[in-house]
Image (cartoon, rainbow, N blue to C red):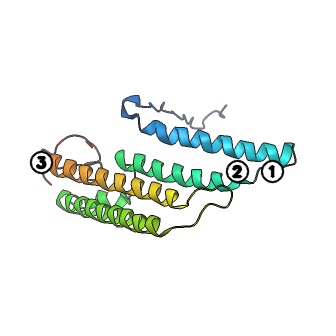
Amino acid sequence: MTAPGMPQHQIELEEEQIDLSDLRWHDSLVLLVFWLLFSVVFLQFFTRYVLNDSLGWTEEIARYLLIAVTFIGAVMAVRKESMIAVEIFYRWFPRGLRRALQFGVDLVSIIFYGTMAMTCMRLAQRTRQKMVSIEVSKSYVYWGVSICFACMCLLAIWILIKHLRTGTSHLIDPEQPDEPATGSE
């Protein structure tokens, strides 16, 4: 309630629409691994604080599942082109410079993802150590991360081709992210 003569401020909240057409079957993989992580952490909590007899393997497995959620989620973020970017500078640059910067960012991303995939692959090949709590090689963790980086690299190549073909992206033309460019500034 406002006092007479005072301006009345209204806050309008827009309902956020979730576009289910943007979800793919492989997006459910990160959800599955997340629920597996949740189950292991709940089991760890339950056995430690309720039963007062902790299962030793839950902490290590939870750590590796968290790594899996992180990198599988990163693949999903690359596919959706939702990685972090400093967008404020793009607003002040002319369209030609924004296109050049987008091309540079796409190339740097491809080089980074490819380099990390190769580095993780070499690390996985050299790892002979087993996990502490179960008799499984730690190299499987590195192979999984390597596969995720390789998927990110392939998706980044596909995104670069799409940006070159359409001439636009959400950073080049924030108003029309999926439309081909029609004019220049």
State the CA–CA distance, disc 1 to disc 3. Answer: 64 Å
Q: Quadrant of the C terminus?
A: bottom left
Residue receiving disc 2: 58
Q: Which residue is at a point 53% across and 49% down the rendered structure image?
A: 69
Quarter residue 110 falls in:
bottom left
Image x and y of residue 140, in percent? 50, 56
Residue receiving disc 1: 54
Quarter residue 19 falls in:
top left
* Marks 3, 2: nearer the viewer: 2
Image x and y of residue 106, in percent? 27, 59
Q: Are marks 2 and 1 in contact (CB under 8 Å)?
A: yes
Numbered label tally = 3
Secondary element at tag 1: loop
Q: Which residue is at a point 60% across and 62% down the rendered structure image?
A: 130
Question: Is residue 81 shown to the viewer in this render?
Answer: no
Amino acid at dot 3:
Gly
Residue receiving disc 3: 183
Secondary element at tag 3: loop
Question: Is residue 120 shown to the viewer in this render?
Answer: yes
Amino acid at dot 1:
Ser
> Vertically, is 158 above or below 8?
below
Closer-to-camera residue (162/125): 125
